[in-house]
């Protein structure tokens, strides 16, 4: 079984999982990520309520074991100021 280990960033109000945009493309879901996620550089930050579920479903369907490493801040996360996710950028 393949595995994918990602960072799960949370602040007091929300959470996002950081994943390389190329990984989303390779999994065939880059165009399924909502505008509620963010992007910066070569990484996407998938919001926890919907887009993370999409990632889990495709990983499960492809036999990929997804593990998350939690990183919490009690302050407002800087992820909230990143660019809105747009497929194809």
Image (cartoon, grey):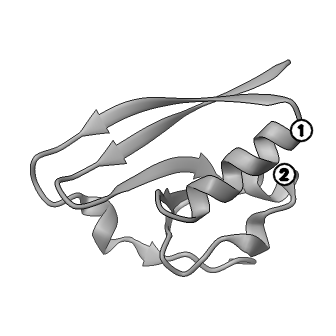
Residue under circle 1?
62
In the image, taking residue 62 as reference, residue 58 lies left or right, namely: left
Q: Position of residue 80 (x, y in %)?
A: 30, 69
* Label number found at residue 9: none
Q: Is residue 42 in view from this perspective?
A: no
Q: Position of residue 87 (x, y in %)?
A: 71, 77
Q: Residue at x 48, y 62 (%)?
A: 49
Residue under circle 2?
27
Give the label, 1 or 2, closer to the camera.
1
Instruction: Work out which quarter of the rendered image holds the N terminus and state it.
Output: top right
Q: Residue at x 84, y 51 (%)?
A: 27
Q: Position of residue 77 (x, y in %)?
A: 23, 58
Dot 1: element: loop
Q: Considering only vertical position in the picture, is 69 above or below 81? A: above
Q: Considering only vertical position in the picture, is 13 above or below 56? A: below
Q: Considering only vertical position in the picture, is 70 above or below 85? A: above
Residue extending furthest toward the top: 1
Q: Considering only vertical position in the picture, is 3 above or below 31? A: above
In the image, taking residue 27 as reference, residue 48 lies left or right, namely: left
Count of residue discs: 2
Which is nearer the N-term, disc 1 or disc 2? 2
Q: Residue at x 75, y 77 (%)?
A: 88
Dot 2: element: helix
| Contact check, label 1 and label 2, Cβ < 8 Å | yes
Instruction: Work out which quarter of the rendered image holds the C terminus and state it.
Output: bottom right
Q: Residue at x 60, y 77 (%)?
A: 34
């Amino acid at each position: 079984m393949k595995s994918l280990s990602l960072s799960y960033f949370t602040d007091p109000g929300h959470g996002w999982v950081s994943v390389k945009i190329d990984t989303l493309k390779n999994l065939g879901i880059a165009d399924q990520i909502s505008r509620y996620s963010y992007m910066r550089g070569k990484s996407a930050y998938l919001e926890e309520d919907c887009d993370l579920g999409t990632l889990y479903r495709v990983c499960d369907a492809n036999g990929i074991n997804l593990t998350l490493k939690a990183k919490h801040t009690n302050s407002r996360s800087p992820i909230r100021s990143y660019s809105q996710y747009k497929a194809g950028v």
